[in-house]
Image (cartoon, rainbow, N blue to C red):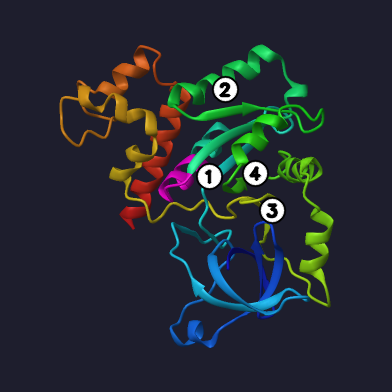
């Protein structure tokens, strides 16, 4: 049977088989011999060794669609980028860096603005408009008031989702509420994973429903973009591509070049100036890194 690794510790891998439950498994020695290591998020084939105790062995790793380093997890379908609209105020440049980091890994991004109970509707709408113009799915929610979670749950269906964002924006509150909202017996799943003396601070996946998972140690702990060439940065500001055909020069970086379609779009209000400011800031940072 096939399932997804939701946690691994002390040589054990806990595999969630939809509609069956969590199996405690060992990995066959063939993985070590082939220098393969199962990761959280891997889809695997298992053989059951003890039906009643739900124990077995991981016998095959299925192909990975992607792999993140921080958090170490594979087969991520989307990232929820969580920022608060107040307390703390959103750092737009940091938000844009998160979006670059996500798109570098070919992961779909959903922007989730939390704490909407602390700001006026007009200001929230202005904030969302920046990213809706860029083509991102944007949510405005309040974990405090339990508002907006129906749409979140719909977006999580049949996907593995990592939550990213700075501290203090409510990521943990959102994940806790998602667990309360699910109809699965999360407590039984947790007891199965935590049995014995196993303790961990490693990443693991929380099943929300069949084939839907969230990462419970959310976010990217590192936003270093050293592996990104400055000339490639424009690819990760996804709204630029709509206007690049209007650039006079091929390979335009949208900074010093004349007759630039992207800069024209900013003048026309079709691209947010704050997004372009972030682009310039990150571009200069990458240029300085390559200088040394």
Give the structural element (helix, strand or loop) at label 2.
Answer: helix
Residue 71 lies, in percent from the top left, at: 58, 59
Furthest residue to the left? 249
Sort mark 3 into few (<14), some (14-19) or many (20+) by Cα contacts within 10 Å.
Answer: many
Check the picture and name the quadrant holding the N terminus: bottom right
Question: Which of the pair 53/101 is nearer the observer?
Answer: 53
Q: CA distance from mark 4 to mark 1?
A: 17 Å
Query: Magenta residues, as a range?
Result: 97-107
Give the structural element (helix, strand or loop) at label 1.
Answer: strand
- Is 50 above or below relative to 112? below
The residue at the point 44 percent across, 26 percent down is 134
| Image position of 121 (left or right of 272) | right
Residue 196 lies, in percent from the top left, at: 83, 77
The circle drawn on residue 130 is none
Is 101 contained in the magenta span? yes
Furthest residue to the front? 51
The residue at the point 29 percent across, 17 percent down is 264
Give the structural element (helix, strand or loop) at label 3.
Answer: strand
In this rendering, the label closer to the viewer, 3 or 2: 3
Residue 170 lies, in percent from the top left, at: 74, 40
Q: Which residue is mark 2?
A: 128
Tell me which numbered mark, 3 or 1, is placed earlier along the sequence.
1
Q: Which residue is mark 1?
A: 78
Q: CA distance from mark 4 to mark 3?
A: 23 Å
Sort mark 1 into few (<14), some (14-19) or many (20+) by Cα contacts within 10 Å.
Answer: many
In this rendering, the label closer to the viewer, 2 or 1: 1
Mark 4 vs 3: CB contact within 8 A = no
The residue at the point 45 percent across, 42 percent down is 100
Tell me which numbered mark, 3 or 2, is placed earlier along the sequence.
2
Question: Which of the pair 184/202 is nearer the observer?
Answer: 184
In this rendering, the label closer to the viewer, 4 or 3: 3
């Amino acid at each position: 049977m096939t399932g997804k690794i939701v946690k691994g510790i002390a040589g054990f891998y806990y595999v969630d088989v939809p509609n069956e439950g969590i199996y405690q498994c060992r990995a066959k020695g063939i993985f070590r011999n082939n220098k393969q290591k199962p990761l959280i998020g891997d889809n695997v084939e298992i053989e059951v060794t003890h039906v009643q105790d739900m124990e077995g062995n991981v016998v095959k790793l299925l192909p990975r669609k992607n792999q993140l380093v921080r958090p170490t997890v594979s087969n991520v379908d989307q990232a929820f980028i969580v920022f608060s609209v107040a307390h703390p105020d959103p750092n737009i440049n940091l938000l844009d860096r998160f979006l670059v980091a996500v798109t570098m890994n070919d992961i779909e991004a959903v922007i989730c603005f939390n704490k909407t109970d602390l700001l006026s509707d007009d200001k929230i709408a202005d904030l969302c408009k920046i990213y809706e113009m860029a083509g991102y799915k944007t949510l405005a929610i309040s974990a405090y008031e339990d508002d907006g979670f129906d749409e979140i749950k719909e977006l999580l269906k049949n996907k593995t989702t990592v939550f990213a964002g700075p501290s203090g924006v409510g990521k943990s509150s959102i994940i806790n509420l998602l667990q309360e909202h699910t109809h699965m017996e999360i407590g039984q799943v947790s007891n199965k994973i935590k049995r014995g003396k196993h303790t961990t601070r490693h990443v693991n996946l929380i099943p929300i429903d069949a084939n839907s998972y969230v990462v419970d140690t959310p976010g990217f702990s590192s936003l270093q973009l050293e592996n990104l060439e400055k000339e490639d940065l424009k690819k990760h500001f996804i709204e630029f591509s709509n206007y690049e055909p209007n650039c006079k020069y091929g390979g335009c970086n949208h900074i010093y070049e004349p007759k630039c379609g992207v800069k024209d779009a900013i003048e026309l209000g079709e691209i947010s100036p704050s997004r372009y400011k972030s682009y310039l800031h990150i571009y200069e940072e990458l240029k300085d890194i390559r200088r040394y």
